[in-house]
Image (tube, grey):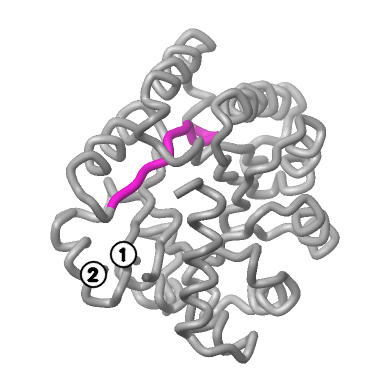
Amino acid sequence: MFIDVHCHLEMLGDVEKIIDNAREKGVGKIVAAGTDVKTNRFALEKSEKYEEIECVLGIYPDDALKMTDSDIDKEIEFIRENREKILGIGEVGMDFKNTLDEKGRKRREEIFRKFVSLALDLNVPLIIHSREAERECVGILESMGAKKVVMHSFFGDMDLVKKIMKNGWSLSIPTCCVKTDWFWGVIDFVDLSLLLCETDSPYMHPEGRKARKKNEPANVVASYGKISEIKKLDLRDVEKVIEGNYKALFGI
């Protein structure tokens, strides 16, 4: 089966329609990523209702800045309480796009370390957001001894990609790879055993911004297709290997 390892289900509208569309394309699993208190509960609820949906819970870096330590700790406790119902911790990480001052960066790092510690304690994978903080995220993950990691829509340089490979972490290839040539080099360079596929729905549409429509899990097949093309492998072989990668990482 095809697998969308990262999407924002709460932003896509009719969940049953989204699942039907995915099923028609052979997409058997959809991993909904929480980004705050509300969406964590949405993702958890849908994962309990629909067989096709799994979830990871976390706090998006920008949302985390709006929360007090007490609020964050309460959400961490909620995640702990639901350990048996989730696949991992995400979407978490750091984002320096709109944070230039040292105080803001230190706060982001402090929060990120809390979630890395949580994932290590629970022995589950981390799904990492690292926009314009790629080097810092990789450094923290290495320093804390993280072993189960998915670098989501990673745009760091190839030296960092090499570090990711050395650590045995996974990279999830978004559907925008059809148009975004940065990912072509990553796909070519990284061993298939370390690749996963995602839509990041409703973002990262295969047709790019010109599509002017929401991405959705059914489109994850486009990522598989680009991997198949670049690696010169049969699509079904790519599908099987990535399904194995997913199951091995998440202990399924």
In this picture, is 13 found above or below 147?
below
Q: Which residues are magenta?
A: 53-62
- The reply, left or right, for residue 244 in relation to residue 157 is left
Q: Which quadrant of the figure contains the N terminus? A: bottom left
Q: Residue sitting at 49 percent across and 13 percent down? A: 73
In this picture, is 18 found above or below 86?
below
Q: Which residue is mark 1?
A: 28
Q: Residue furthest top?
A: 70
Magenta segment includes 57: yes
Between residue 145 and residue 175, name the one nearer to us: 145
Check residue 17 in the rendering and tell me which mark sits there, or answer none.
Answer: none
In this picture, is 222 found above or below 156?
below
Check residue 23 in the rendering and tell me which mark sits there, or answer none.
Answer: 2
Residue 111 rendering spot, x and y as whole percentages: 61, 23
Residue 119 rendering spot, x and y as whole percentages: 58, 30
Residue 6 rendering spot, x and y as whole percentages: 44, 54
Between residue 201 and residue 234, name the one nearer to us: 234
Mark 1, secondary structure of its residue: strand
Q: Residue sitting at 45 percent across and 65 percent down? A: 204
